Image (cartoon, coloured by chain):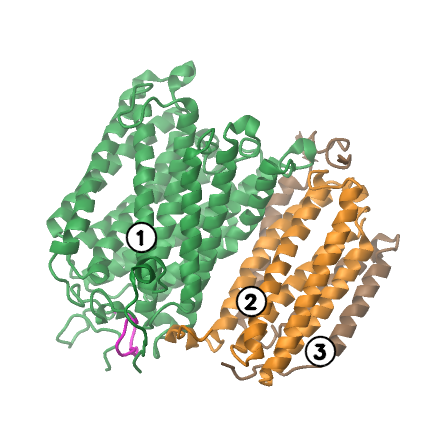
Amino acid sequence: MTTEAHVQHPNYVKVWAILVTLLAVSVVGSMSHVRVVLLVAAFGVAVVKAYLVAKNFMHVTVEKRWVPYLLIMCLLFIAILFAGVAPDVMKHSGVNWSNPSANRPAESGAAVKRE
Amino acid sequence: MSATAKPIANTRSATGIPTARLITWWVIASEIVIFGGLLASYVMHRIGHPEWAESASHTLTWAGAFNTFVLLTSSLCAVLAHKAADAHDGPRAAKLLRLTSLGGLIFLCVKAYEWTIDIREGFVLSSGGFWSFYYTLAGLHGLHVLAGMIIMLIVAADAAKNQELQRVECIGLYWHFVDIVWIFLFPLLYIAR
Amino acid sequence: MSTDVQHAEPGIFRKYFFSTDHKMIAMQYLFTGMAMALIGGFFAYVFRMQLGFPNQYVPGYGIVTPGKYNALVTMHGSIMIFWVAMPVLIAAFGNFLIPLMVGCDDMAFPRINRFSYQIFLLSAVVLLSSFLVTGGPFGGAWTAYPPLSASAAFNLTPIGATLWLLAVVLEFVAFLLGGINFTVTTMNSRAPGMKMYDIPLVVWMIVLASIIFMASVGPLVAGAVMLLFDQTMSTGFYDPTRGGDPLLWQHLFWFFGHPEVYVVLLPAMGIVADVIAVFARKKIFGYKTVLYTTWAVGFLSFVVWAHHQFVAGIDPRMANIFSVTTLLISVPITEMVFLYIATLYGGSIHLDTPLLWALAFIAEFMIGGVTGIFLGSSGTDIYLHDTYFVIAHFHYTFVPIAIIAVYAGLTFWYPKMFGRMLNETLGKIHFWGTVIPFNVIFIPLFITGTAGDQRRVYSYAQFAEQSRPALQHLRTTSTIALLVMLSFQFVFLFNFVWSLRKGKSAGANPWRSNTLEWTVPSPPPHGNFAELPTVYRGPYEYGLPGRADDFFPQNVPD
């Protein structure tokens, strides 16, 4: 059973080539010592690649509108989760409190137990 | 696959989206919050523990980068399969889906090799905060790759007979989602800061 | 267009155990849920006997040791929420009603539906198996906070803790699959002519509950994987000495845990809405408002979770924010209750058993709601947290949800499910014998809680400052009331079983209701509709002037 095609198919190989180029950019950029360059290369590129895959491969922009809204809503919930939890879990000290276990690098996981 | 007749419920489409694709979007939505929850937990810890950067520097960036390339290429095959299915070319769609699966297999093999090196160096799941997250995140993702491969081969078997071609797009959507998760895992796990 | 279902009558296994028919799957969920309710209820009996008559031998059980007490309360909570409320309210009613009420022949994906039940059944079996292992079942509370839940050295139930966690994760997977099936069926498989606002509220509510569940459970699935690894693989996700944080579990748990209570509330409110409309012979007052406020509740439910953690050491500024949002969420819920009351006003009230249950839901849930205000405000919660006040509050919300509304739904749809009417007299006896004792159980607990009685303590005899002997008569009263309430449930069980054979034949539409499930025979045949219906109007056209009948079914042309 087939359904009628609901999308126009762009040049997928061209999209793939852009994605691979961006991958190369992010790998090269990650070797930089400048923090901003590193972050943009790593995460900025990731966001762009994700958008390209979503738009060109998943055709999410030609779907019914509520589909991308649903997906964005799920991302929003994760953002809310992060906002509500980070003050307790990401930070290890503040006004009137500190998390001494977390602040002890030797025990907190940097010292790796090699088996 | 045509042994049980489909219920009328499956064939209706009050939203205008075919039922198979509709359920795929809902599955993807539920997976966003699963991976999102795990990723958010990791990011919080990673930012809060700058000393994890030392551990993170031991991950094999070349393996991660190569695997990213493999998944991107397999995604290309998946979407070309969708295009073939739209053209009612079931055998071609099946061939492309099988190539996509092969990409998944390569991904898992590279990962197996990579993890062997890591484990030989002494980094296991319980080796510390960073490594626990590393194996859990990549492991959960890897399970989704494996599940995707299996379903994809089942869909390909039907597509080769020009049956259930609407499922080609759907398994492709799932595969692209798994690809997008890896697109974010790669910088988070492999690019040490 | 007629459904052309071309297969022979299936054998016993295909018909009862491996069916893909949504009605049979509904029965599977219903009976599994009812069986688990007997177990959960038995555990409540045991621990309340311990609390009412401390350190005495409990008939049918034995002596309650501290470890056993912890396991009993943990299992009672877990079972009632995950293996009773959810399967009955969402899976049983959802499976039975949705295809019938939207006018199609089954769920969009019947085999995924069957698979969901199989996973659910497996989860129940895994949980029950934990009663048989060394160390016994998990006793770290249904909230399972680490390090108690993560470390066998603390919880003393190494196998039980992991089995509990696996059972919960399997249950989540089952409901994810099931919920997505319900959502897709409701979105796509509606009868021609059934627009969004023609969908009965119970269906809307079950679907919205499924969506809320789906969006909130993800982080907890992640958290559960991490806890599983802490339990079994020596990781330290929740161990502060190893770079983890126990507070992370709390947040992940409650990020799901709070929306979860709305996940069970919404179907209950949907059932009550439909029952009220039918038995007041009146249109729902403000159907769209009910819908929009439900969406608001659904969204708000995601931003209130840390009110469970006010005393856990969270950032006090976050506590302020969560107090505000928690108090805010009471507004839309109250509005919905007012809309139900407005529906009743001026209606032609028929005080049959289903409506009695619906009215009890409104009254009891409101008490639960207003007592929540004290807990939602961080200041008062500092005192009340972990006292019996909390227990009384959530039983005044959960019992209306999981027991009262369920009985409303069962007494209302029993005729459709089984083709027979339940006995009204027994129904009313059961009703009063449940609702009155229910209040006598929990009002004393508000009092003891305010006086300072702490939760999850097996006996105050060990703690001099806790013992408050002057209050023991309240604790004993609560226990005796529970015994009374439990006894009256046998009236229902008898009614249920007896009416299956001896009840009056129901016919297709004994309640003269508008919705589509009442247009087919009772019980509905495989395939549901001989002729798939077309819908011409909304589900609540009751009492229209100028018509001979006081109802106007959805499928009757103008």
Foreground disc of the pair 1, 2: 1
What is the magenta range? C527-540
Q: Chain of mark 3?
A: A
Tell which of C64 and C513 is nearer to you: C64
Foreground disc of the pair 3, 2: 3
Q: Give coordinates of residue C113: x percent, y percent.
A: 41, 61
- In the rendered image, residues at marks 1 and 3 fall on the same chain: no
Residue at the spot of label 2: A69
Q: What secondary structure is marked by label 2? A: helix
Residue A56 lies left or right of residue C363; in this view the side is: right
Residue at the spot of label 1: C30
The Cα atoms of the two marked residues, 1 and 2, are separated by 35 Å
Q: Is residue C399 visible?
A: no
Q: Chain of mark 2?
A: A
Position of C354 relative to B177 (above/below): above
Q: Amino acid at mark 1?
A: Leu
Residue A77's quadrant in the figure? Answer: bottom right
Q: Amino acid at mark 3?
A: Tyr
Q: Colour of chain C?
A: green
Q: What secondary structure is marked by label 3? A: helix
Residue at image point 23% right, 32% down? C483
Residue at the spot of label 3: A12
Tell which of A50 and C446 is nearer to you: A50
Q: What secondary structure is marked by label 1? A: helix
Q: Colour of chain A?
A: brown
Residue at image point 60% right, 72% down? A60
Q: Amino acid at mark 2?
A: Tyr
Residue C418's quadrant in the figure? Answer: bottom left
The Cα atoms of the two marked residues, 3 and 2, are separated by 25 Å
